[in-house]
Amino acid sequence: LLFLVVYRLGESQLVKLASPFLLDSREADGLGLTTGDLGLIYGTIGIIALSLGGIIGGIAASRRGLKYWLWWMVAAMNLPNLVYVFLSYAMPSSLWVVASSVAVEQFGYGFGFTAYMLYMIYVSEGKHKTAHFALTTGFMALGMMIPGMVSGWLQELIGYQHFFIWVMICTIPSFILIPFLKIDPKFGKKEPK
C-alpha cells in the first residue's frame, strides 16, 4: 500500500502548481500565459496527450502484463516532469514549446497511470474485491491530497525552479519500491482466445 501512496508523490505536488506556474507573470517567475492559452494547452492538447498515453498504456499492458511494463510506466509517469524544470529555467515565450512540453508530460502521465490503476486492481484481488478496491482508492486520494497540501507553501518558500527539482526528487521512492512488489507476470495480460 505504501507504493500506492508514493507512486504519484511528485505528480501530486506538480499538479497543484503547474497551472499557477504557467499563469504567473514573468516577474513572479511564471510563464505569463493567458487563461485562453492555458485552456488550449491543458484543456485540448493536454487532454489529447493524456488520453493517448492511457490508451497506449492499456494496449501495452494487455500484451505483456503489468510486471513487464511497471518500470517503464513508473518512468513514464515521473521522468516527463523534467519538462517543468526545463520550462522554469528556459522560460520560453513560444506557446508551442510550452504546449509540446505539457503534451509530453501529460502523455507520460496517461501511460504511467495505467500501471497505477492495474496495481490497484491487482492488490484488490481476493474475496472482498469491492471493499479492497475502495481501500486502494482511499490510498490513492491520500497520496494526492497530503503532498498537495504543502506544495503551494513549499513553492513560495523555494521558488518554481527549486520546487520542480524537488518534484523530481519526490519521484525516487516509487522507483525504490518496485523491486519489492510481488506481481504475477500474467496479471494484466490479455489471454489469447
Image (cartoon, helix red, strand yellow):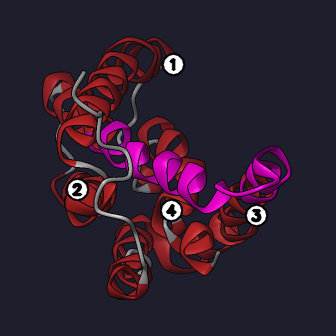
Discs 3/2, front: 2
Magenta segment boundaries in residue numbering: 108-136
**44 is higher (above) or lower (below) than 71:** above
Percent from the top left, x then y, of residue 132?
78, 56
Q: Which residue is mark 4?
A: 8
Tag 3, which secondary structure? Answer: helix
Task: Answer whether labels 4 and 2 touch (C-beta < 8 Å).
Answer: no
Q: Quadrant of residue 20?
A: top right
Q: Which mark is residue 142?
A: 3
Write the residue at 35% across / 69% down. Answer: 161
In the picture, which quadrant includes the N terminus? bottom right
Calculate the distance from the C-alpha at mark 2 to the C-alpha at mark 1.
Answer: 36 Å
Percent from the top left, x then y, of residue 147?
66, 70
Calculate the distance from the C-alpha at mark 3 to the C-alpha at mark 1.
Answer: 29 Å
| Closer to us: 159 or 96 | 96
Side of 43 where 120 appears, left or right: right
Q: Which residue is mark 1?
A: 35
Side of 1 where 132 appears, left or right: right
Q: Please name the predominant secondary structure of the magenta segment in the image.
A: helix
Amino acid identity at mark 4: Arg
Write the residue at 40% across / 42% down. Answer: 114
Image mark count: 4
Q: Which mark is residue 93?
A: none
Write the residue at 38% across / 52% down. Answer: 187
Side of 48 where 147 appears, left or right: right
Q: Which residue is mark 2?
A: 69
Percent from the top left, x then y, of residue 186?
31, 54
**180 is higher (above) or lower (below) than 128:** below
Tag 2, which secondary structure? Answer: helix
Q: Earlier in the sequence, mark 3 or mark 1?
A: 1
Q: Earlier in the sequence, mark 4 or mark 3?
A: 4
